[in-house]
Amino acid sequence: MLLPLLALAACSDSASFPSRPTTTFDSEDSGLVQVGHDRELRGVWVATVWNINWPSSSALSATQSQEELITLLDVAQESGLNAVFFQVRPEADAMYQSELEPWSRYLTGTQGSAPGWDPLQFLLDEGHARGLEVHAWMNPYRAKASSTSSAASNHQSVLNSQYAYPYGSTLWLDPGAPPVQDHLEAVIGDLVSHYDVDGVHFDDYFYPYPDGTPFPDQDTYAAYGGDLSLADWRRDNVNQMVERVSNKVAEINPAVRFGISPFGIYRPGQPEGISGLDQYAELYADPVHWKANGWVDYLAPQLYWPTTQSAQAFEPLLDWWAELPESGRSTYVGHALYQLDSSSKWSLDEFREQVRLTQERRDKHVYGGIHYHIGTLAESSELREVFREEFYVTPALTPPVFDMASVSVAAPELVQTSTGVDVSHPAARWWVVYAEEGDGWRIDRIQTATQASVSLESGRWALSAAGKHGVESLGVVVEVP
């Protein structure tokens, strides 16, 4: 396990959140220096529901599907990103080997039909080799994206059919049903126990977006609602789920972060002048409550409106979310990259402005963004160049996992070679290489710890080790003649 190794580590700095200043002190006795850089989550969503991003077809062979995944990971890396949010549970199914839920129909065309390989494990191996974090994006309550699709015998719509309701064109699991809650917790516990994911992530789907018809949970409410109003009971169901998932993830591996990307408006009028759907009253989602109670490592509100749209203005919404009461947990921004060139409001300059506004809010704990979706980047080498050369020029690790930010990491052991150094460490995920610049240290690159050798040119360098939880060690100074 990673945690005991980190907890026993010595000879390191105490990790601050989210990053340390680049001003350094140099200890001639220890050969160690303080290093650090501005942290930023640079993420992208990879949607599997309806085969939006991957696989392009359920008729692909394993080789073709793997080639498509590699292409998408290369797109993320080429764009300067450091995290992918991969949809592993689009409709109470699995894009990985699960004993609890059937294989997704988006893999083979038939739910429950094994593809002959494990997409999530493949993605983890290939993503981590490229220095990318891989977050498991899960939909907690959607049972079917199309209510008429066929279900496998071990699907929740079969096993708990009394709690699976047609709603619009979808089938929805009842958030107030104890078997639904228990199953979801078990699924997440199983995934985090068996896969080296960097995070568990939910998007904005809790109770379904209303279509004018009532959600048919009257029997469950009568059985479990107690003295609460229907609205308060529904919110409490979601709150309990978020708390249970948070506790389960932390119990199994506290280095795995848990976060949610809610609808971008909390309530109309918050902030003043904003109008739109009331997620508190209509989706029964209370992200303000989740963040205030420390149940999430971050919120990533989906601010899917242009800066020029006054009723859902990007900048006032960004500031409102950033200024929520919290104790160091991050805010990321969900960017509507899929809208690029869809109208005159969604030009490349609009995205430049949104990223600029986001990056200017570091003093408010806004530490990055997640782009929906990777397909837009995959289609344009020009856009990838803008990301790499304008948005994300300097390499960066994501912010440390909040509840583990004080868990220190030992400095790596180095052996100098003719071309640089060989590096070793029992629990590192990354080597971070700094070049001496003036009185401080400038980040030069981030390299995965699976590579034991770091090439260095002539000069003075400092190398740190960073753990899965994102904390860096002190830097070991190396002078190359």
Image (cartoon, rainbow, N blue to C red):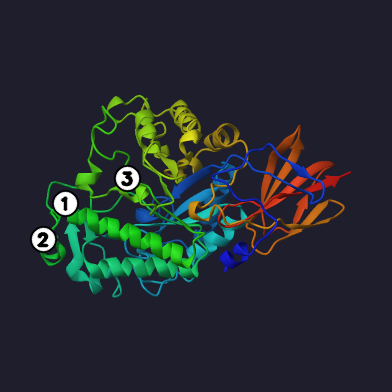
Q: Residue at x 52, y 43 (%)?
A: 42
Quadrant position of residue 6? bottom right
Q: Which residue is mark 1?
A: 231
- 1 or 3: tag closer to the N-terminus: 1
Point out the image quarter for the N terminus.
bottom right
The residue drawn where x is 27% and y is 69% is 156
Quarter holding the C terminus? top right
Between residue 344 and residue 37, name the one nearer to us.
37
Query: Is there a contact, CB below 8 Å, between mark 1 and mark 2?
Result: no
Residue 12 visible: yes
Does residue 201 appear left or right of residue 82 in this picture?
left
SS state under label 3 = helix
> Residue 68's spot in the image, x, y percent?
51, 54
In the rendered structure, which amino acid carries the disc numbered 1? Ala
Q: Is residue 288 left or right of residue 368?
A: left
Q: Which mark is residue 218?
A: 2
Q: Which residue is mark 3?
A: 288
Q: Position of residue 352 (x, y in %)?
A: 48, 29
Label 2 neighbour load within 10 Å: few <14, some 14-19, many 20+? few
Counting from the top left corner in percent of width and height, residue 174 is at: 21, 62
The disc labelled 3 sits on which kind of residue?
Val
Q: Earlier along the polypeptide chain: callout 3 or callout 2? A: 2
